[in-house]
Image (cartoon, rainbow, N blue to C red):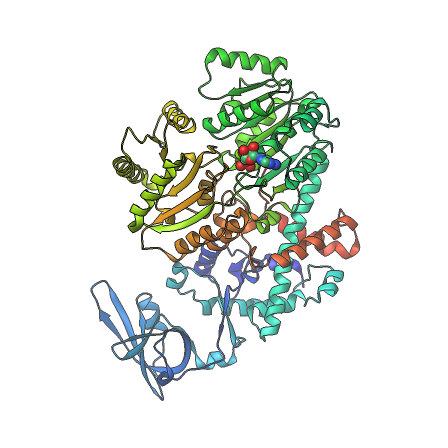
């Protein structure tokens, strides 16, 4: 078939008028024949069974019934009208009900003519009814292409209201197969077809829309999922190849005095295997001649800081400067103090620059940066100001990447002849499944091991009604010399309410834990940075035993003596946030606890989240659950990612197919990097088509 036929605008398909075309474009993004053919059902209904009305059960399952409408009437009700049809078969009667689309129904439905209806039934006042049934004339039903497994296409209320039902989509699909004769060019090379015993693309497309058997449907889905994932992986791999070739980076070939000295003489602890592995990966990047663009993922407390330091030491060994950016002042200060401590035996100069750095100090830093006296600069967004000019920035490390936008990061680039190497560190675990489809498998390092001797945090879920017990527990822990966090949700839309919650909470805590015996810090988003720091410091220094806060303390704060994290209205937090918060404790030698407070009313998802938190400490496991609960579109930082708008594959469920697709894509590019070979011509063509439509989001660089 001529591939160009598929580019025909959808308006030209028989059965699609201008208004339908407009709806298809607007609501479903279907512009061409090709878009329609790639509009896949999201489930299938088993229509092997026909029910009789007297067989219906009160469990409201989806059923299919053959019968006739004997009359239609309109019933006035408080809010609007409803249209009710009496529907009978030889065993009994029931009602069909419509709340919308009355005009269309009145004009189109036929009385006393056999229909096949399909839908959910309700049982009310001794009578079954079916709201908004799918309907088809029995005569049509018998001669259509449709089969026992009926596809259900994604839809919207607007489409249904305008009469574009599932049935209509189905008919359009049928028309499309007639016009194209159902012959579609194949997009995968022969060797893959043979190795995976794939059915042809034409057969797959037909069976995904009109399954002729369960077996063929599975084969069709496999084939199409594989194809979709294969082209995404191909694109990612090509992008990475281009990146490696084009963007030159400084070559850090020597591992010199700073690194060696630190490694051999001043390591405060034995590195974990995972830390060693990651440092090796970074070292190899830094020496490769291409600019490093690496994401370092490691759960809270996994020891990313020392990896950052050792990477920076390599930069210094090669005559370059390095910087470390953190999202908040508090974190910058902690990094600064931590690094100063680690480097106390080394001959490195380190400074910190934040919004509250005094003007005179600021000038001094600017100067030392430009003349190269300063080796390492730590700080907040203040590092991105125009006045901050490095003599030769070789490595930029960004902690907790999700707080910085892409454009902000690239500002660091503008200060050099070549871009500095970039290492982004995050404790927000991106599920492996997702990371792989976002980046191929390149340039992601994972610290998947915690330093030895950590005691896993004990997590429990308590209802508000058990608050007194929780208070008693807090008292006992404070008695033992521990410190406590109590965190309240902060949700943008209702900041006022959150503030009130926090203050109410603070008051009741203050009553329960009165001064002078107890001291309480409070930190929230509406405070001035200086006040925040002051309160934070009192807690860090152990002057206060309880820290009442909103989620501003979420990221990175390190108070090893804090052993209890209490999260109020825990059901309102997402999993990754809960996990981040929990990571604030468990940093010392003592047993730590996380207590998730909630009311009794919980949504299913809320319940699942709390249960998951109780059952695991593994950030990656949590991220996988999060992905399943919320879908990839909602994960932090992935919204812009076009590649996640998958048409048929599911990044979580189809992970095996993804891996296989990636392996084949890789193999193909290794053998034929420019896709020049005859047998790859169709791949090259399809690749160009796909690349035109799906632009892979540039995640790091
Ligand atoms: P994060 O990955 O959350 O940034 P940090 O780098 O702050 O973690 O490390 C958390 C704590 O673990 C720090 O107190 C650090 O000194 C300690 N630590 C890091 N690596 C090791 C190790 N290999 N052995 C023992 N303790 C370690
Ligand atoms: Mg950290």
Q: From this viewpoint, is residue 701 visible?
A: no
Residue 256: percent from left, percent from top: 73, 24
Looking at the image, residue 562 sits to the left or right of residue 234; the answer is left
Residue 189: percent from left, percent from top: 73, 59
**59 up-or-down from 573: above or below:** below
Residue lying at 46% horizontally and 27% vertically, measured from the top left: 330
Looking at the image, residue 517 sits to the left or right of residue 61; the answer is left
Q: Nearer the viewer, residue 269 or 331?
A: 269
Q: From this viewpoint, is residue 263 visible?
A: yes
Q: Residue furthest bottom?
A: 90
Residue 136: percent from left, percent from top: 43, 76
**557 up-or-down from 209: above or below:** above
Looking at the image, residue 654 sits to the left or right of residue 193; the answer is left
Q: Nearer the viewer, residue 373 or 279?
A: 279
Question: How many numbered discs?
Answer: 0
**592 up-or-down from 96: above or below:** above
Residue lying at 37% horizontally and 81% vertically, measured from the top left: 56
Residue lying at 66% horizontally and 59% vertically, measured from the top left: 3
Residue 361: percent from left, percent from top: 50, 13
Q: Nearer the viewer, residue 58 or 217?
A: 58
Q: Quadrant of ligand 1?
A: top right
Q: Nearer the viewer, residue 388 or 166?
A: 388
Residue lying at 61% horizontally and 49% vertically, measured from the top left: 437
Residue 493, quarter of picture: top left
Image quadrant containing the C terminus:
top right
Image quadrant containing the N terminus:
bottom right
């Amino acid at each position: 078939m001529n591939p160009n036929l598929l580019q025909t605008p959808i308006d030209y398909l028989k059965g699609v008028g201008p208004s339908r075309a407009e709806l298809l474009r607007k609501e479903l993004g279907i512009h061409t024949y090709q878009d329609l053919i790639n509009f896949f059902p999201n489930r299938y209904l088993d229509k092997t069974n026909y029910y009789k009305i007297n067989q219906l059960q009160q469990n409201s399952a989806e059923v299919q019934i053959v019968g006739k409408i004997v009359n239609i009437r309109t019933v006035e009700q408080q809010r609007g009208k409803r249209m009710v049809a009496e529907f009978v078969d030889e065993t009994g009667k029931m009602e069909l009900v419509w709340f919308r689309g009355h005009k269309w129904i009145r004009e189109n439905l036929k009385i006393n003519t056999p229909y096949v209806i399909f839908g959910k039934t309700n049982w009310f006042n001794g009578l079954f009814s079916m709201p908004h049934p799918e309907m088809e004339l029995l005569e049509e039903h018998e001669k259509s292409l449709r089969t026992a497994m009926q596809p259900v296409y994604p839809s919207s209320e607007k489409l249904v209201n305008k009469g574009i039902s599932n049935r209509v989509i189905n008919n359009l699909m049928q028309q499309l197969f007639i016009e194209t004769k159902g012959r579609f060019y194949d997009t995968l090379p022969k060797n893959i077809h043979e190795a995976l015993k794939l059915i042809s693309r034409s057969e797959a497309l037909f069976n995904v829309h009109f399954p002729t058997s369960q077996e063929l449907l599975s084969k069709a889905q496999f084939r199409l999922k594989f194809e979709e994932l294969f082209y995404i992986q191909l694109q990612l791999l090509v992008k990475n190849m281009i990146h490696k070739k084009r963007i030159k980076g400084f070559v850090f070939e020597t591992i010199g005095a700073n690194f060696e000295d630190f490694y051999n003489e001043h390591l405060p602890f034995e590195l974990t295997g995972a830390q060693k592995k990651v440092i090796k990966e970074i070292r190899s990047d830094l020496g490769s001649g291409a600019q490093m663009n690496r994401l370092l993922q490691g759960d809270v407390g996994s020891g990313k800081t020392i990896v950052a330091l050792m990477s920076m030491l390599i930069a210094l060994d090669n005559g370059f400067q390095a910087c470390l950016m953190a999202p908040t002042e508090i974190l910058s200060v902690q990094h600064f103090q931590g690094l100063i401590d680690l480097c106390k035996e080394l001959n490195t100069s380190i400074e910190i620059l934040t919004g509250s750095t005094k003007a005179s100090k600021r000038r001094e830093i600017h100067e030392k940066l430009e003349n190269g006296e300063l080796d390492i600069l730590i700080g907040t967004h203040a590092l991105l100001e125009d006045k901050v000019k490095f003599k030769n920035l070789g490595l930029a490390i960004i902690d907790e990447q999700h707080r910085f936008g892409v454009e902000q990061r690239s500002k660091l680039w503008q200060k050099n002849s070549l871009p500095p190497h970039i290492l982004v560190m995050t404790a927000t675990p991106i599920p492996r499944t997702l990371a792989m489809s976002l980046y191929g498998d390149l340039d992601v390092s994972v610290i998947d091991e915690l330093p030895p001797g950590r005691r896993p945090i004990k997590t429990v879920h308590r209802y508000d009604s058990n608050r007194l017990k929780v208070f008693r527990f807090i008292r006992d822990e404070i008695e033992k010399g521990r410190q406590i966090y109590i965190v309240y949700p902060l949700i943008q839309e209702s900041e006022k309410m959150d503030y009130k919650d926090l203050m109410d909470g603070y008051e009741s805590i203050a009553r329960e834990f009165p001064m002078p015996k107890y001291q309480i810090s409070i930190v929230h988003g509406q405070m001035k940075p200086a006040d925040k720091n002051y309160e934070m410091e009192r807690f860090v220094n152990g002057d206060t035993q309880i820290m009442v806060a909103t989620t501003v303390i979420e990221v990175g704060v390190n108070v090893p003596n804090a052993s209890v994290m209490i999260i109020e209205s825990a059901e309102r937090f997402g999993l990754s946030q809960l996990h981040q918060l929990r990571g604030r404790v468990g940093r010392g030698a003592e047993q730590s606890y996380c207590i998730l407070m909630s009311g009794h009313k919980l949504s299913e998802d809320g319940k699942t989240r709390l249960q998951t938190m109780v059952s695991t400490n593994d950030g990656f496991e949590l991220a996988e659950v999060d992905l399943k609960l919320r879908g990839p579109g909602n994960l932090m930082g992935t919204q812009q990612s076009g590649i996640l708008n998958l048409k048929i594959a599911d990044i979580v469920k189809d992970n095996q197919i993804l891996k296989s697709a990636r392996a084949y894509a890789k193999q193909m590019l290794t053998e034929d990097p420019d896709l020049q070979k005859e047998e790859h011509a169709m791949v090259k063509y399809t690749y160009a088509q796909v690349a035109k439509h799906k632009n892979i989001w540039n995640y790091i660089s």
